[in-house]
Amino acid sequence: MPQNAIPRYQPTFRKDEIDLILRFAARGESVGFMGIAGVGKSNIVNFLRDLPHNAFQSAQEGAGLFFPIVDAPQWQGTPESSWKMMVEALDQASKELVPPAGDNKVIPFDRDERSFKALQERLQWICRELGHKVMFILDDFDQVVETGPLPMLERLNGLRSELRGLLSYLVITKRLPHILGRQLNLAGNSKFYDLFRHNIYALTPYVRDDALQMLKHLNELAGNRLVEGQLFEIYRIAGGHARLLRLIFNIWIEEGATGIKATYFANKPDVKQECHRILTNLHRHEQEVARRIARGEQSADDQAVIDHLARRGLLDNTSPPAWFSPLFDQFLRTYEG
């Protein structure tokens, strides 16, 4: 990429969300973000991945802040795989540090315990001995929150208790964690959930500046084939939804579209599939109310869910309800699933 290329992210990318995350991490406190499918959760992860560990100095002179990224969909369903993934993520995030030799005097027989001990020792070294802070990014954590096991989640809380003020978690899900974790009674039984239960925020679609920055970046990579007005039209149609922005941009480039209405894109298979993914990743009650809104059949009983959909960024307006994207609006009007 040429040196004068338009960067994917501006320094002000997701400014409110990034500032919030950094404030929590600097205090050693955990936070949760919930966002609809394709809204750009991974872009926040990528932004934090590329953030220099010393870009945000903590109160302690010289201390750094590391963001190990755990890609939860790769989890194999066992505590051992969790601890190994966390060690690998920590090693990747702190690869500029040279770890000390391991203590082999006492080696747990159980493989799960061996993996957990390796994680524990690495965190003690980075946080206690070197004075850095660590915020694990638990990305796409829905399945783990839903299935547990609960004792494994509670060990995450135990690690944080050992390193209070130094270790925290950024938990990213598509649905509210206490809804996902009903079978585990997460809300009543989990101290891990208590770490962030009062600090859960909705991740809404991009604001205009972030959406247009993404489109300008894509456009430059494509040889600047679209003019500014066309990029703005893509933003208007996609409503700031990261995945829809990319899909519409690609279709426009591939088909040389000019002056095309939202209905044209709404009928494209990839766009339909993405809208379907957004809908089916909502909670059942949200899906039901969304379909009633599309039919104009919502009632006063639906208002609490309508307000919730607005907080999540799916609705730009609640009276009357207006969807974040004309594409999603049309998809709901014709959806027969």
Image: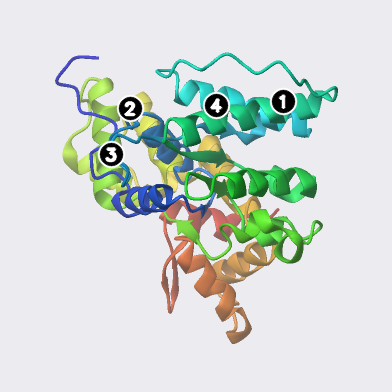
Evaluate whether residue 46 shows in this view: yes
2 or 3: tag closer to the N-terminus: 3
User: Which residue in the protein does label 2 denote?
Assistant: 253
Give the color scheme: rainbow, by chain, secondary structure or one colour: rainbow
SS under mark 1:
helix
Q: Which residue is mark 1?
A: 115
Q: Nearer the viewer, mark 3 or mark 4?
A: 3
Is there a contact, CB below 8 Å, between mark 1 and mark 4?
A: no
Q: Earlier in the sequence, mark 1 or mark 3?
A: 3
The CA span between labels 2 and 3 is: 49 Å
Q: Does residue 75 appear anywhere in the picture? A: no
- Which corner quadrant of the image does residue 296 belong to? bottom right
Amino acid, disc 4: Ala
Q: Earlier in the sequence, mark 4 or mark 2?
A: 4
How busy is the neighbourhood of tag 4: few (under 14 within 10 Å), some, or many (20 plus)? some
Name the side, left or right, on which 9 lies relative to 280.
left
Instruction: Indicate which disc residue 61 carries.
Output: 3
Q: Secondary structure at mark 4?
A: helix
- For this orientation, the residue located farthest to the front is 105
Q: CA distance from mark 1 to mark 2?
A: 48 Å
Query: Which residue is at the front of the view, 301 or 112?
Result: 112
Tell me how far mark 1 sits from mark 4, CA to CA: 13 Å
Q: Residue furthest left?
A: 4
